[in-house]
Amino acid sequence: MIEYFYLFSYKLFAFFIRTLPASWLDKIIRALARFAYFASAKRRNVIHANLKVCFPKMKEKEKKAIGIHSYQNLLHGIAGFIKRERQSKEEILQNIHFENREILDNLLRNGEKVILITAHFGVWEILPSAIALGFDIPLSTVGRELDSKLMQTYLKKGREQVGVELINKRGALKGMIKAMGEGRILGLLVDQSIPKNLSVAVTLFGKKVTQTPSVSILARKFKAKIIPIYITSHDFKNHTITCYPPIMIDESLSKEEDIKRLNQAQADILEKVIKERPDEWFWSHKRFKVYDKEIYNA
């Protein structure tokens, strides 16, 4: 019964998202973002702790604005996902601008294996649909399945109708290998903290953090190019998706050395884009908790 309640709630929410005037929806999202920021002192403290590590000179007023903005990104992502369920390819792509798209175009034209990496940055939920449709490629992404099987089926269908395959995060490596073996493009979020025993250590904003080695392992296995790709927006309506130069494997290095180097290169580009647009990252993750958990105890 609870399954159908979740689905009913989602469809009711979707009805309001689709019928509300854009100006009203923007105001509601701004209000909800402020509520989310102020409602949980625990989550707010995580945001401020992360910003203190990355931008030690940042004033509290700016931290507050960034925290609220990060929730707006999240909420606009949910609203956008709902709207895209009934949009055509042209409607989905009409407010998307691709910067440096020739980087990915050239690799695809030459038949190269490609792994895309990104982060919880900007309205990141738009990325899979925009990439799959904008480059006309079969895309596979990794994510945790929802607790509700009915909702999971519903949301999976929404992704697959634009050519995006969902790979369950649990036991994902097998699914990722299968996807790449079938010639699909793989896309992963690589900015969250993971257990030490499953990770490679990298440096981010001068701090030691954990990072998944999956991308680097697969790049070595398939001789793939790693393409960082991030989405940004100044108004939550018009979005820019930027491709960055490929991160290349180095077969002259040992597997262990190269994986370490590849992972650090991924962390370096993440730090670069965060420094350029700090209001676009979702600061609520405890990114530094494995090696510096005391950061979050203040």
Image: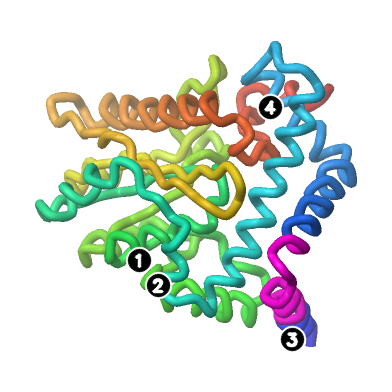
Which amino acid does the dot numbered 1 rest on?
Answer: Leu
Gap between marks 4 and 1 measured at Cα: 34 Å
Tell me: residue 148, above or below residue 30: below
- Mark 3 belongs to which amino acid? Tyr
Q: Residue at x 62, y 20 (%)?
A: 54
Give the Cα distance between marks 3 and 2.
30 Å
Q: Quadrant of residue 100?
A: top left
Q: Which residue is mark 1?
A: 133
Of the two numbered discs 3 and 2 on the same chain, state the one appearing first in sequence. 3
Q: Is residue 10 visible?
A: no
Q: Give the SS element for disc 2.
A: helix
- Answer with mark 2 or mark 4, whichever residue precedes in sequence: 4
The magenta segment is 11-25
Residue 162, relative to residue 208: is it above or below? Answer: below
The x and y percentages for residue 157 are: 49, 79
Label located before the other in sequence (3 or 1): 3
User: Which sits earlier in the primary sequence, circle 4 or circle 1?
Assistant: 4
Label 2 close to label 1 by CB (< 8 Å): yes
Tell me the tag on residue 4. Answer: 3
Residue shown at the point (61%, 47%) measured from the top left: 235
Query: Which-is-in-front pick, marks 2 and 4?
Result: 2
Q: Position of residue 33 (x, y in %)?
A: 78, 49
Secondary structure state at the residue bearing disc 1: helix
Q: Are marks 2 and 4 in contact (CB under 8 Å)?
A: no
| Magenta: main secondary structure | helix
Mark 4 and mark 3: span between their CA atoms?
A: 38 Å
Q: Which residue is mark 4?
A: 50
Q: Which residue is mark 2?
A: 89
**Residues marked 4 and 1 touching at CB (< 8 Å):** no
Residue type, mark 2 in image = Lys
**Discs 3, 1 touching: Cβ within 8 Å:** no
Instruction: Tell which of 118 and 19 is nearer to you.
Output: 19
